[in-house]
Image: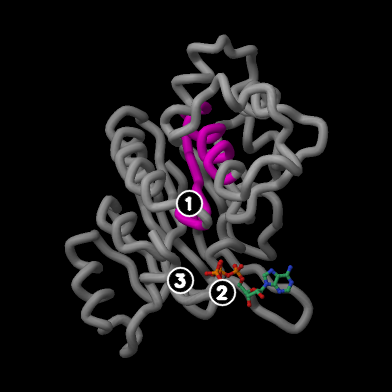
Amino acid sequence: MLVLKDICWRVPEKEILDSVSLTVPDGKCVVVTGPNGGGKTSLAKIIAGIEQPDSGKLLLDGRIINRMSVTERARNGIAYAFQQPVRFKGLTVRDLMELAVGEAMDEDALCDSLSQVGLCAREYIDREVSGSLSGGEIKRIEIATVLARRARLSVFDEPEAGIDLWSFNNLIDVFRKLRSEVDGSILVISHQRRILEIADEIVIISGGRVSAQGSREEMLPRLFDGQTQGRPCPLERGGA
Ligand SMILES: Nc1ncnc2c1ncn2[C@@H]1O[C@H](COP(=O)(O)OP(=O)(O)OP(=O)(O)O)[C@@H](O)[C@H]1O
């Protein structure tokens, strides 16, 4: 379980996160949504250890992780898929998958993980994760690295970004399956209604604050009736 208590983060002249508190319970999927620039990716970076909060506490399974580095957090069970994946020069898809799971993988294991995101392992494992892969392919490979880790906490930042309609449909099933099979927690940042529909809890972050949170049943009608913050929430961005 991940617990965030009163997380604040500011950069010169700007408060980016202002006293953000939320919980991602075991076995649950929490979806964070909200307007562009609200602070969602910043929050994900703070959870992964890429940025350090100025104040507040992060607890993973009851243990304070504020001082842990990115690598230590990864070792302790946090897996993070970036909104814009990093292209690693010289690294093959197999290398990336093996780095993520921390051990050598045979073709069957690679095939299992990559087929979840609609990619054929045989075509991809020896390719370099740089120039020749399309943006959507890299995004899907990165999602596969997180799925393969079966981590205590899996964080996906806009998994829908750059993903075609067919892969997106598949991804929804993959998240459903992940939630039912893994006893860890899942945090997804998304603007997509179909991802919000698989959430146990929905959190809206706007202007660096949690502006609303609640169960899916409670939040979806509020979001899609445009009642949250008294104006429509820009949820249906992108083509999927
Ligand atoms: N290192 C930084 N320095 C200055 N401003 C930053 C920094 N990181 C983020 N911001 C600003 O903080 C705000 C929140 O950014 P963030 O990327 O967290 O938003 P978001 O909710 O993920 O947006 P989107 O839905 O567009 O992906 C934005 O205004 C952004 O420009």
Per the image, the residue denoted by label 2 is: 18
Earlier along the polypeptide chain: callout 1 or callout 3?
1
Residue 182 higher or lower than 226, as above or below: above
**Quarter-wise, where is residue 43 in the image?**
bottom right
Q: Secondary structure at mark 3?
A: strand
Horizontally, residue 187 falls left or right of residue 88, namely left
Direction from residue 49 to residue 112 in the image, left or right: left
Q: Earlier in the sequence, mark 1 or mark 2?
A: 2
Magenta stretch: residue 98 in it?
no
Residue ID at (56%, 74%) = 18
Mark 3 beta carbon near ligand 1 (under 8 Å) = yes
Respond yes or no on whether mark 1 lies under 8 Å from ligand 1. Answer: no
Q: From the image, tell me which residue sits under label 3.
A: 205
Amino acid found under the numbered disc labelled 3: Ile
Q: What is the CA distance from the residue labelled 1 to the residue labelled 2?
A: 31 Å
Task: Single out the residue that lies furthest toward the right.
Answer: 90
Tell me which segment is drawn in magenta.
139-161
Q: Is residue 160 magenta?
A: yes
Pick whichever, 112 or 10, lies toward us.
112
Q: Quick one: SS at disc 2?
A: strand
Amino acid marked by disc 1: Ile
Q: Earlier in the sequence, mark 2 or mark 3?
A: 2
Q: Which residue is mark 1?
A: 163
Q: Residue 81 at x, y = what percent? A: 57, 45
Q: Secondary structure at mark 1?
A: loop
